[in-house]
Amino acid sequence: MEMEVSSGNFLHEMIESDLAEGRVKKVHTRFPPEPNGYLHIGSAKAIYINAMTAKKYGGLFNLRYDDTNPEKEDDEYVQSIYRDLVWLGAEPNGGVFYGSDYFDKCYEFAVKLIKQGDAYVCDLNADEMREYRGTLTVPGKNSPYRDRSVEENLALFEKMKNGDFPDGFCTLRAKIDMASPNMNMRDPAIYRINHCSHHRQGDKWCIYPLYDFAHPIQDALEGITHSMCSIEFENHRPLYDWVVNKIGFENPPQQREFARLNVTHTVMSKRYLRQLVENGTVDGWDDPRMPTLCGLRRRGYTPSSILEFVRLTGISKTLSLVDIGLLEHCIRDELNYSAPRRCAVIDPVKLVVENYPGDKCEYFEVKNNPNDESASTRKMPFTSELYVERSDFLPEKAPKFFRLYPGGEVRLMGAYIVKCTGFETDEEGRVTLIRCTADLETGCGMPADGRKVKGTIHWVSAKYNFRASVVRYTRMFTEENLVQLPEGKTYGDYLDPQSAVKYENCVLEACLEESCPGDRFQFVRNGYFCRDTKYNDTFNLIVDLKDSKGK
């Protein structure tokens, strides 16, 4: 699909100023995910901003895996990230890169900083470093190792690289200002020891650069002009600028920040999402309840609906919580015009038309999509025994209930008007069969006597059908705002145990048997559904027909 170009915003105003003043010749952006989990709906905003911006200005867009933390990274995540980008329509025209490609250059630049007197090896452990760092109101104090000579620092850093020290024994720190009001500038660590095999580099390295050091170097080496990231990195920008300036890059990249995407009833923490997968709470990263892009894809969301959702949320620096109903609106609005209509009886009960010949079958022509003139029609087989929804029948008439009840009439969608003549139940009182007669003159219109029939219900032939499972999904978390949890609460306190309800042996139109995994339909009166890509005999609810706020 084509990623549409957005209208202007504060990021584009900056870029246009850079272009007009000649500071930038060709716009070059990047998306730098850490391959330690699957991308989620929040990632889509960063992808959209960076890829769309490059497209708008005829520039380049890179995918760069930030694989500088080998303990949590895996090739599984590398592959999934690329699949998601391509699926969203954001295939990187500038190339695919890895942070680990630059380990040699990062080491070279770290040595340069040491020689310039801008970095030193520090033996403080993590607790001591926190103590020396100070607080927001109390300035930090210099490490006792801050004034080591260049020669000593070079020798110690070499030993770190050679594996002479255990994990955590020491770090390489930037020498900036321990009294800085910005905590990120108080001599941050830029290299740590980690004797861990890397998914691409193997055991070549036992020291790894930290993100705040590696990221600006990677941007600069790739020729990135505008490094656009989420707002939590705003206070890291002075360190970003310090790194590229101290190393001496010509035409250094610029970092700018935007508000991240927070969505109601949704958790964006990859750590917690991984926990849900590992403890079996969900059916993998692509569980249709998950906010991951692969989960949304399996559920039946389209790339265009997700990108439209991101576009509608806007680009600003103001933090906000977006109602997930907006995402549901985007896919519902799209499928209303694109999804073929089909009948599916999810909780079936048999309906016997007593005055219809048992050996007869006729076909009624119904529209595939009344909102799409090009969708044509299909023929539904009508027989003496049908299935209807259990909820479309009541043993006794109730106020404002316009469906089936003893003595009541209802239109079978696209076919006859029928009148209930009786019903049967099992020993528990559960209805097992409904009996009716059909007004056989109403197959193509209203009754000749002019009587009004208010209700219309859907149906499927008991003889010609396709049996499958249907899963109805609701929101996985009951709490609206999961960004700010009440004290003492965790995400797990708000998991809805009824967020996925599976219905077995549902009765669907026979033509649905020929559908393909990923095909989307409107099951009339039930919602929009997608044939599951993992379990071929299952259809997943994408979204209800109407807004169900709070559901």
Image (cartoon, grey):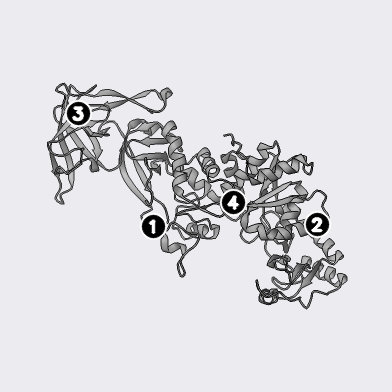
Q: Which residue is drawn at 78% across and 71% down?
A: 121
Q: Which label is found at residue 77?
A: 4
* Amino acid type, residue under disc 3 in the picture: Ile
Image coords of residue 529 (percent x, y): 40, 40
Badge 1 local density, few (<14 within 10 Å), some, or many (20+)?
Answer: some
* Amino acid type, residue under disc 2 in the picture: Asn
Q: Distance between the residues labelled 3 and 2?
A: 79 Å
Comparing 543 with 209, the one in front is 543
Mark in front: 2 vs 1 = 2
Left or right of 357? Residue 192 is: right
Q: Which of marks 2 and 1 is nearer the N terminus?
A: 2
Question: In the rendered image, which residue does mark 1 sit on?
Answer: 496
Q: Distance between the residues labelled 4 and 3?
A: 55 Å
Question: In the rendered image, which residue does mark 3 sit on?
Answer: 417
Q: Is mark 1 on a helix, strand or loop?
A: loop
Residue 478 lies, with reference to residue 4, above or below; the image says: below
Comparing 495 with 67, the one in front is 495
Q: What element carries label 4?
A: helix
Q: Which residue is drawn at 83% across and 50% down?
A: 250
Residue 145 lies, with reference to residue 371, above or below; the image says: below
Comparing 122 with 177, the one in front is 177
Image coords of residue 368 (percent x, y): 37, 27
Question: In the rendered image, which residue does mark 2 sit on?
Answer: 245
Q: Are the residues at dot 3 and dot 1 in contact (C-beta closer than 8 Å)?
A: no
Left or right of 145? Residue 309 is: left
